[in-house]
Image: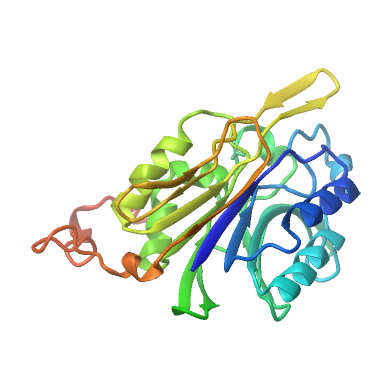
Amino acid sequence: MKIGYLQFKPELLNAKANTEKVSDMISGGTCDLLVIPELANSGYLFKSVDELVNVAENPDDGKFCGMLKKISGETKCHIIAGFCEKAQDNGNTVYYNSSILVFPDGKYRIYRKTHLFYDERKFFIPGNTGFWVYDIYSEKYGNVKVGMMICFDWIYPEAARTLALRGAQIICHPSNLVMPYCQNSMYTRAIENQVFTITANRIGLDVNGSDRVGFTGGSVILNPKGEYLSRASVDKEELNVVEIDPSAAKNKFINEKNNLFDERRELFYFRNSS
Ligand code: ACM
């Protein structure tokens, strides 16, 4: 099956421009699964919650998610994209740093970022979905299990491990990475879980008044052996697609004697018992 990522530079607080740009870049593409960076509709560097009002959207009727559903329906590609989500909580409007998995039939699933990074807590509430795995259909391989985590979730090995224990064959990882560690660390996430990983990072600078932050690009796809199937530049917009056999992620034998998951000894692992 064909899996890929879009690496691009969103325009801060300009949901219309970002929706048009992503649409232009992914329309007509042919792949089974495409991953798009974190907060792709809004950009990253907010200064106040007020700024989210015009860019955040409800996935049922938002324009960015609507565009993804339309393109998924046309191309039969499953699309996972980070977006700024608006939701209701006990009558209050709240915001999540979320990703959406869009199926070609228009259905969707949402993951809300569990581990918020740095100032994100000022704008978003921590995700309440947990880490779940969904079947996407590939003509050649039938149902393939995919899971989502967002950017800073990578630094908690438990995130990828939970997805892998739930059967994920491909971990999809929309990102806005600012530190240089993740792209190389995904090598370990792939090996220690024997899964494929797709990290779709953004590039460029967000500037908001006197604040600025740069993003590190270098989107990566790895296979369960830790081989880099794709590695993007640090500063260019790119859409890259590779061919994989997802069944490789079902084999959890490291060698003929060691099975990664069967030999876990949970008894000795730290668990907060409270
Ligand atoms: C990050 O979690 N966006 C660094």
Kindly give the residue lying farthest to the top in the view shown. 210
Residue 255, x across and y down, in percent:
13, 59
Residue at 76 percent across and 64 percent down: it is: 68
Q: Is residue 209 left or right of residue 163?
A: right
Residue 123, x across and y down, in percent:
75, 42
Q: What color scheme is it?
A: rainbow
Residue at 39 percent across and 67 percent down: it is: 245
For residue 268, which quarter of the picture? bottom left
Question: How many marks can you see?
Answer: 0
Residue 233, x across and y down, in percent:
57, 33
Location of the C terminus by quadrant is: bottom left
Residue 174, x across and y down, in percent:
60, 50
Kindly give the residue lying farthest to the left in the view shown. 257
The residue lying toward the viewer, choosing from 266 and 146, is 146
Q: Is residue 193 left or right of residue 220?
A: left
For residue 34, which quarter of the picture? bottom right
Residue 92 shows in the view: yes
Residue at 81 percent across and 71 percent down: it is: 60
For residue 241, which quarter of the picture? bottom right
Q: Is residue 72 left or right of residue 88?
A: left
The residue lying toward the viewer, choosing from 256 and 164, is 256
> Is 142 situated above or below 63?
below
Residue 128 shows in the view: no
> Is 95 situated above or below 219?
below
> Is 178 situated above or below 139?
above
Q: Quadrant of ligand 1?
A: top right
